Amino acid sequence: NVTGEAYRMQLDKTIKANLMVDAATATSASGGKMSPKQVRNKNKHQDIASHFILRAAYCRTEDLRRWFLTQECSLFQHRLEKASKSSGALQSFLHRAGLKFDRVSDTEKDRLRQQLLSVPGGPGGEAVSP
């Protein structure tokens, strides 16, 4: 099993290889080069389509459904971490989605760390049964 930074690097590599349109070589239906917006839209469409195809394939049994959900959560967490490190990407997304959140200071996070980690289903909390 790959974990930590090696896992994140492997996940990025897999996403680029399988889900991302290469902006340098992407062509539109008319044969011209795709604009950055067209590339983003095509990537988004491929991501959504692959999600629903895999969802249909992996929801035949409860075990497959749980495995798929775990993978989707891991991918979401990875993308959220990347967006939060990117300058303004997360704030831009929250603004476009109409979501308003106040940033939590490091001091406040440290003060609440034990309580947050002990939430059922969290990293330090008890497991949650279905």
Image (tube, grey):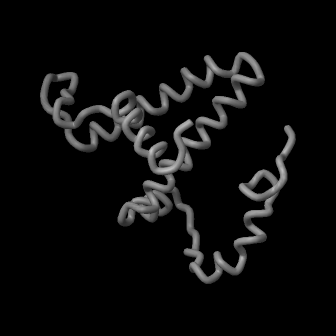
Question: Could you tell me which residue is drawn at 56 percent across and 23 percent down?
Answer: 54
Q: Position of residue 70 (x, y in %)?
A: 65, 37
| Relative vertical location of residue 124 with respect to residue 33 in this rendering, above or below | below
Question: Could you tell me which residue is drawn at 29 percent across and 32 percent down?
Answer: 21
Residue in front for this viewpoint, 65 or 10: 10
Residue in front for this viewpoint, 70 or 43: 70
Residue in front for this viewpoint, 1 or 84: 1
**Which quadrant is the C terminus positioned in?**
top right
| Relative vertical location of residue 78 with respect to residue 65 in this rendering, above or below | below
Q: Position of residue 10 (x, y in %)?
A: 42, 38
Q: How many marks?
A: 0
Question: Could you tell me which residue is drawn at 21 percent across and 30 percent down?
Answer: 26
Residue in front for this viewpoint, 124 or 120: 124
Q: Is residue 115 left or right of residue 98?
A: right
Residue at the extreme left of the image, as rendered: 32
Q: Is residue 31 left or right of residue 18?
A: left
Question: Could you tell me which residue is drawn at 51 percent across and 53 percent down?
Answer: 80
Q: Position of residue 59 (x, y in %)?
A: 69, 21
**Which quadrant is the N terminus positioned in?**
top right
Quadrant for residue 82, please give it: bottom left
Q: Is residue 51 left or right of residue 109?
A: left
| Relative vertical location of residue 73 with respect to residue 100 in this rendering, above or below | above
Q: Position of residue 88 (x, y in %)?
A: 38, 65
Residue at the extreme right of the image, as rendered: 129
Residue at the extreme bottom of the image, as rendered: 107
